[in-house]
Structure formats: C-alpha cells, structure tokens
Amino acid sequence: MSGPLTRVLDAFEAGASSLAEVQASTGLSRDVVDASVDHLIRLGRLDARELAMGCPSGGCGGCASGTTEGTAGCGAPGPSSGRHGPALVALTLRRPATA
Amino acid sequence: MMTSNIDTSEHRHLPGLDLERECCVVPDVASPAGTPVVALVGAPNSGKSTLFNGLTGLRSHTGNWPGTSVEIARGPWKANGVALDLIDLPGAYSLDPISPDEALTRDLLVTDGPGRPDLVVVLADAAHLARSLYLVTQVRELNLRCVVALSMNDVAAARGVTVDADALAASLGCPVVPLDPRRRRGLDRLGDAVATSLADGVPAPRTRPEASDELAREDERFAFIDAAASSATHDSGRARVDWSDRIDRVATHSIGGPIVFLGVMWLVFQATTTVAAPLQDALDGFFSGPVSDAARAGLAALGLGGTWVEGLLVNGLIAGVGMLLTFVPLMAIMFVLLALLEDSGYMARAAVVTDRLMRAIGLPGKAFLPLVVGFGCNVPAVSATRILSNPRQRTLTALLVPFTSCSARLTVYMLLATTFFGRNAGTVVFALYVTSIVFVILVGLALRHTLWRTMGDEPLILDLPPYQRPTLAITATVTWTRLKGFLKTASGIIVATVCAVWLLQSIPAGPGAFGEVPIEGSLYAAMARFVAPIFAPAGFGSWELVSALVVGFVAKEAVLTSWAQTYAIAEGDPGDLGVHLTNSFAAASGGHTLAAVAAFLVFVLAYTPCVATLAAQKREIGLRWTLFGVLINLTVAWLAAVAVFNVASLL
C-alpha cells in the first residue's frame, strides 16, 4: 500500500476538490492530510496560492495574478503589505519536470 | 528543491553560514565545562521559548551564535538534580533547512563532534500531532537521545482528541512527556525523563529511509508518522462543531451554497443602490448646478463665455468628472460591503461554490481563479490566466474573462438601473451579475465543445480559511485602496476621452467651422449615426445612445461622461441626464423603453470591456485569438441584446 503522501497526490489527481474529500478518499486523519499537504508544498509537489481580491501577504509569488517570476502581473507596482485576514488557498499539483 | 535525506557524513552549509565545530560552545556559556548539553527544538511559534524560560528561569543568556547572525538562548537547567546546559535552537519545521535559522538547527544536530548536544527535546503540538512528528522522526533517525515534550493537550482535548503519551512513546521509541509550558505544568516530569535518558545509553536510531526516489523516501517517513499518530490518538467523535462549521454546512452546500451566494450578492447590490441613491442625486445636483454655474460665471467674467473653452470646461471636464464623482459614494459602499465579506472569510466560500459550478459543467476548475479576479478588473484577470499550464485552458479562460462584469461596468448599470427601474435597481444589477456568470458558462461550454474538445483538467483543491470577525482597520484600508484605484484609473481615462470626444464633437462632418458646429452635424455624431442602425433591432439605434458604446470600447468608465458631454451640448445645459436618456430610449425603441434599456445593459455587459483588456489578451494569447475574442464578445452581446429587447417588448 502506498504512503500518505502518494495517497494525497492520488486524491488530487482523482479530482478531489477539498481537503475533506482528500480525507474521505484516502482514509487518513485530517491531521495527517494537513501535514502531508504542508510537506508536499515544501517538496514542491503542490503549489499553494492565496486567492484574494487584495494583495496576498506572501507577495506577488503567492498571487493568482503574479507572474512566474514572482513579480506583479496586475500592473501594480508591487504587493501591498497592508493586507491581512483570511485567504482562500488554492492548492494545485506541480508535476516534476521530466528529463 | 530541498532534500530530505539527512546525511550525517557530509556537513551541509548554506551560503553565508559557515559553522565550525568549536562554535558549538557559546562564549558566554553559563554552565561549567562537561555539563551535559540539551538542545530544545520545535516549530517556530510553538511555545518553545516559553518552555525554555520555564526550565531555565531568568538565568539564560541570549546572543548570536558565533559566525552567524542567528540568535539563540542558552541557560542552566537543573533536571531532577542533574545540572544541564539548555540551548534554545531556532525554530524549525524539519531538518531540511530553507533559512539560515533552520540551517543552524540542522547543522548542530546532524554534525557529529564533541560539541553536539547530548540530548534533544523536541516540542510537539498535540493539536497538530502529525505536523510535529516529522521533525521528531528526523531527530529519531540521528544518533541522539530524544525526548518529546507534548504541549497543546488542552487545545486537542477541546477538539475531542486525546493523545496517549505512552502509546506515542512506544511508537516513536523515545519518552513522551505531556506538559503545559504556559502554566508550567509537567516540567518536572520532563526533567525526570531527560535525566533518565541521559543516564541511559544512546538508543538505536530509527532506520533512515533508503529509497532513492525523494517522494518514496518521504512517504516512508509519513507512513511511520501516520502509524504513530493513529496508534496514539483517540478521537472521541465529539469534536466540537463550532459556528464556523455550522455556517459552512450551508454556505458550501452543493444546492444551498449557490442560493446563499446569490442571496448575499442581491443584498449587497440592493443595499448599495438604496443607500447611495440620495447621495448620488445630491452630488449630481451639485456639479450640474452650482459648480457649472460658477464656472460659467467665471468664464463670462474673463470674456470666454459661449466659447469653445466653456464647452470643453463646463460641458466636458466638469460634466465628465462630476459624473464620475457622483459614483464615489456608490463605489465606496459597495467596496465596504465586499471588503466585509472578504475579511469575514465568506468570499472564500463563494469561490468554492463557483469552482464547483465550473467543474460540474466540464470547464477546468482552476480557470475560476482568473475569472473571480475578473469581477474586479479584467486586465489582471487576463494576466492571471498564466496560472494555467495548459495552453488551451489558458486561451479559453482569457476569452471568457471579458464576460465577467468588472467594476467599471457597474457605473453604467447603476445609472440606468436607478433611472429606469427605481426601487428594483439593486435587483436589476444583481440580475446582470448573474447574467455575466451565465455568459461565462454558455460561451465556455460552446468553445469547449467546438474548439477544444480534448482539453484536460488540472487538479485543484481549495483550502478554506476560518471565519473571523471583520476588522474596521482592514475594511477601511481595503475600501480606500480600491476606491483610490478606481478614481485614479477612471480620472485618467475620463480626462483623455473627454478631450477626444470634445474634439470629435467640434469637428464638422460637413460645412462649418471648428467648434461652431451643432453636435448633430459633428464628426462624432456622423460616426455614431453610421453604426447606430446595427442596434435598431435591439431597440437603441439612436446615435446619442450608440455613441457612448463606441467610446465605451476604449473604457467603460467613459460611457457616462460621453453621454454627459453629448446631452450637455445637445441641450445646451447638463440638466438631468436621466430625462435625456429616457427620451432617447423611448424614441429609439418605439415606446418599449424598459426593454431597450435592458437590452442596452446586456450589451454593455457582454461586449469588449476596454482596450487595456485587449492589450492584455494580445500579450497572453496573441493577436489572432484576441481578434477572435472581440468577435465573440460583439456577436454574443448583439445577439443577447436583440433577444432581450424582442422578448421584453412582448411582456
């Protein structure tokens, strides 16, 4: 049987649309799912972007409008440091580049 | 990319961090030589410093680790009568460093030598046990004594989760001590466990994962973590269902969610129109009355009364800028309401509802990200399509973005809705936003089933933040930032288009002198007249109405100002724009005024938003697709407007 990380990635691939669905399809506890997602982000296997109408606190690299270089893609001079509050986080798969 | 395979044989260094073995003894060490060294590690903000202070009292020393700018604390700790030297290492989620702080923690634990700690206390969070256990697992793979200090047990208990410390210790192969650093509970037990471990030999480390593939290696660790957490955690099933969960059961429900979303947005538009209407009327009266009169009087005193200067200044700039400023209260109220929804966390739920809808109809779920941005402004939304790695998805989404109703179009909706639909203005604007979503879906489905039948989808998961009470400071800041942005963008566009429109209205289409031609005989009117018959089937084929659509192709902010200019010149007085528009729509539609207005609104919603969006599209998807997009927008807008007029005329 594959490990938790692979099971979480498989759930993504299978079209789960929320962490609750990942939890249901993997049979893992929510705590392990959260830890797995965090670790997959650190590993570069998942991409996490804040979705907000203002500038995300993590700068342009974490914004849906940000460029691939991490600069502003919306015409603004740069990220606003004044934004706080809850933000929806969009998690997407990042497939490792093949040689 | 980081590596997670800890290698004790090779001392890894990050740039700028040159650690030598002898630096493991801080110069101002408080304990005598030979005192066992205990390192305290844990995630940042895990309460590690609180525990350190609780164990060492006020006898600790703080300073930079030699050769680095990393600050650590060190102090003596008497554990069960044993004198120890306690080091509070920088917070780290793992031993895979992504910062100099984490690198120091890793180097001190991994590198073998005389200054290496004799024992490591890992502070773990019982409320997020699996997250904490990754660091514990890595420490257990080192040839070190390890004791786990388990905190946040009260938080876990409040969630209905209890952690069996003995079972966890058996799984991890090291002592686990429940404690509460804030209340200084369990510190003695920790001292006992540390003293006992130090008296024993170094336990056999956990076998390090050996798989060559990084994911397989990490999976092995996480399988160990999952097994340890599962065996030690007991979920009573009475997990507290808080008010946030209760709201989400409805707000993200597959049927209830969209209904709540539509209801909330209806309330936003209804409240906006109801509260803003009197303020808007007062400002309109102020600019068309005292301000315009004062400007005319001033110009007359300068001998410029009745000249082109008065035309440009009073009928152009004052009418145009005044029209823009009347929308400030309206935009401010709406921005406040949207900021409240966003700051409370509700907008995240609305995004989940939208995403589910996109997937349900077979459109790429990830495409909803730029589309949501598009309801603010289409230009960054087109740029945001870069998050889609599939070129077909990117092109499709960039073509759909113009159908999302940006805030600039809202000014046109508001003026016409409040003028023609009175108390139902909010409902009309709400209906336009719903129509916007319908356009996105229908056009998306049409393109999906004709041009891009083989388009795939990319997995996407939305992680909801908790609800929170909106704060005045954040709401005010967000509102002001957006209002300032709207005014800055709109004012620049308006001054430029006012001048351009004035110029075209001053140039005679036939005989006559510059600036002395009636507007009906101007180049502006001639151009609009040429286009106007196209819109006759939609009920608004008059040159006055259509001219604003031509100007609106440049930017929607300029639609109202061009009307203000046109009617001010045509009637010789700015007067009541609503009366002029009513007469024009009535005449153009053969008496079916409301049907024509509805058709006009739908056309404004669906046709090309502005040239800036076209520029962004050209940059992202190329000229060919951009021109295709213009064609789609104009075609859909015209067909929908004609359909609305003809159906509504029958009612």
Image: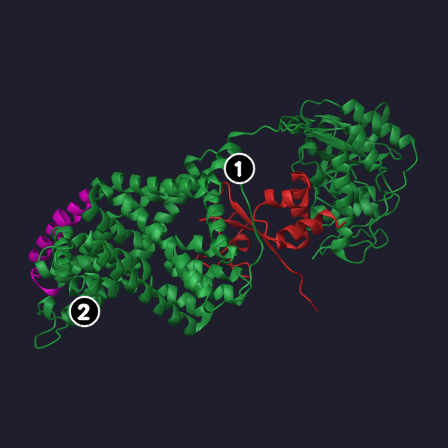
Chain colours: A red, B green
- Residue B130 located left or right of residue B538: right
Q: Amino acid at mark 1?
A: Pro
Does residue B271 appear in this view? yes
Identify the secondary structure beneath mark 1. Answer: loop
Identify the secondary structure beneath mark 2. Answer: helix
- Residue B503 located left or right of residue B123: left
**Residue position for label 2:** B533
Q: Viewer-proximal residue, B634 or B644?
A: B644
In the image, residue B306 lies in the stretch drawn in magenta: yes
In the rendered image, which quarter is residue B23 located in?
A: top right
In the image, residue B291 lies in the stretch drawn in magenta: yes
Dot label at residue A14: none
Q: Residue at x 18, y 42 (%)?
A: B282
Q: Indicate which disc, 1 or 2, sits on the residue closer to the N terminus.
A: 1
**Residue position for label 1:** B466
Q: Viewer-proximal residue, B248 or B512?
A: B248
- Residue B460 located left or right of residue B265: right
Which quarter shows the N terminus of chain B? bottom right
Q: Amino acid at mark 2?
A: Pro
Q: Viewer-proximal residue, B324 or B647?
A: B647
Q: Residue at x 69, y 67 (%)?
A: A98
Identify the magenta region.
Answer: B281-308
> Relative to B474, does residue B600 appear above or below in the rendering?
below
